[in-house]
Amino acid sequence: MDRRNFLSKSSAALAVASPLAWADDDKKKSKKSSDHHDKPKTTEPTTPAPNPTTPPTGTTKSRVIVIGGGMAGATVAKYLRLWGDNIAVTLIERNSSYISNIMSSMVLTGQRTVSSLTYSYSKLTSAYGVTVVKGDVVEIDPVGVKVKLANGTILTADRIVMATGIEFDAVPGLIDTNVMPHAWQAGAQTTLLASQLNSMTDGAPVVLTIPKVPYRCPPGPYERACLMADWLKTRKPKSKMFVLDANPGIVTEVDNFTKAFAMHGITYVPNAEILSVDPATKSLTTTMGNFINNGVVNLIPGQRAGKLITTAGLNNATKLIGDSAFRFAGVNQLSYASTVSGAGKVHVIGDSSATPQPKAGHIANQEAKVCADAIVRSFAGLQPDQAPVTNSACYSTITMTQASWLEAVFQYNPATAAMVASVAGSGASVGWDTENFEDMNEWFTALMADSFA
């Protein structure tokens, strides 16, 4: 696949879910356009042009509560209001702003700041009429469609959308995650890991660990390892980079990352599952041996659906071998409604849902639109779109100035009731270059604007 077509398609695919028939004429999309069979002629997002709305007046027909303001939550809140003027949307988020995990590894090399990755919810309120509530949800009632906040407030709705992200598995021996930061949720730990890299002794080993799939952003750990190794060459040239992968091999972009690891001199150890750690010496015991006295350890633990999913009993899918509990939420992939009996009015999108699609920011944006479209249709007495198409696109920084790209298109398969990867439209770059690195910024800007602006 041509790289330019990839960039164009990845931006255009932000508009995967089509508005309904009652939308304004300039917002209408034909089914063919929605499924992006035609090659887009622009690198700009082809989502409906922002059309500022105000909260509905008079009797509100429907109410939706969205829990979590990340890529999935912000997008679904925006598009519920954009496509459903008569829907009141309340977004509940514990933080006052969102810090993007995408591009956050560049904070480690000093190429970006956390502030450059921080996004406000103000446009969701001012331009789309979303009510944003800062608070913690401590309990949901899937049957009664109720949400309880930490301050005791109980909110009711017609639907709940849960975009609660991930929780990390406990690592035996690791009491304080700041000793071996994961930096897999951008923010304080990202800054901490950057500080540890800068202050470590030149010549000390640097270790990055990768958990078993599924985890957030499949290329992310390999990309970060490459970026850190490139940074080490000039800042800590005596230090070596080690990657301990709990999986039997590189899980994505195998050719690119295999060659990149060789180029950077990265020692790659597959099947290295973490058994325990010693924070005092920054040492790790794994199924492939012991790795002792490290300078910096970027320990990325195993992941599962957000705690609220588990406490609500919605974690009914994706049980790993040897795991004692299911990890993610099973969903109807036409609407992202929970498959748990009695919980059909609760939808789960983003990293907490269990689908064949990768857990990534671009897919979270896509799932949010399919979900929003299905909810709007449902309130109108209609069935969800029976043939949704989503697009997963990302760039990987192979060096501090060069990147590769990867794209996968997913289509709904009625026989398996699941989104499946399509050969058509999927592909990856052969190698990496500076042009891809420049295009990465354009893709990122378009994606974040589509979710938050």
Image (tube, rainbow, N blue to C red):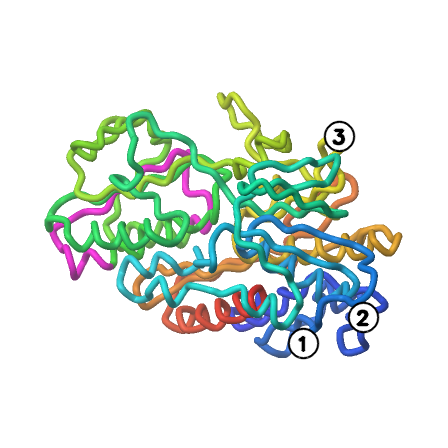
The part of the image, by quadrant, that contains residue 397 is: bottom left
Dot 1 falls on a residue whose secondary structure is loop
Name the residue: 48% across, 41% down.
215
Q: CA distance from mark 3 to mark 1?
A: 38 Å
Residue at label 1? 49
Quarter of the image for the C terminus: give it: bottom right
Q: Which residues are magenta?
A: 231-254
Q: Which mark is residue 341?
A: 3
Q: CA distance from mark 2 to mark 1?
A: 12 Å
Q: Nearer the viewer, residue 304 or 92?
A: 92
Q: Which mark is residue 417?
A: none
Name the residue: 73% across, 59% down.
88
Dot 2 falls on a residue whose secondary structure is loop
Q: Are marks 3 and 1 in contact (CB under 8 Å)?
A: no
Residue type at mark 1: give it. Answer: Ala
Left-right relation of 206 to 415: left
Dot 3 falls on a residue whose secondary structure is loop
Q: Nearer the viewer, residue 79 or 94?
A: 94
Q: Residues within 10 Å of mark 2 (few under 14, many from 20)?
A: some
Name the residue: 31% across, 50% down.
225
Q: How many marks?
A: 3
The x and y percentages for residue 13 are 63, 65
Residue type at mark 3: give it. Answer: Ser
Is 137 placed above or below 190 here?
above
Is 281 placed above or below 254 here?
above
Residue at label 2? 23
Residue type at mark 2: give it. Answer: Ala
Q: Is residue 363 visible?
A: no
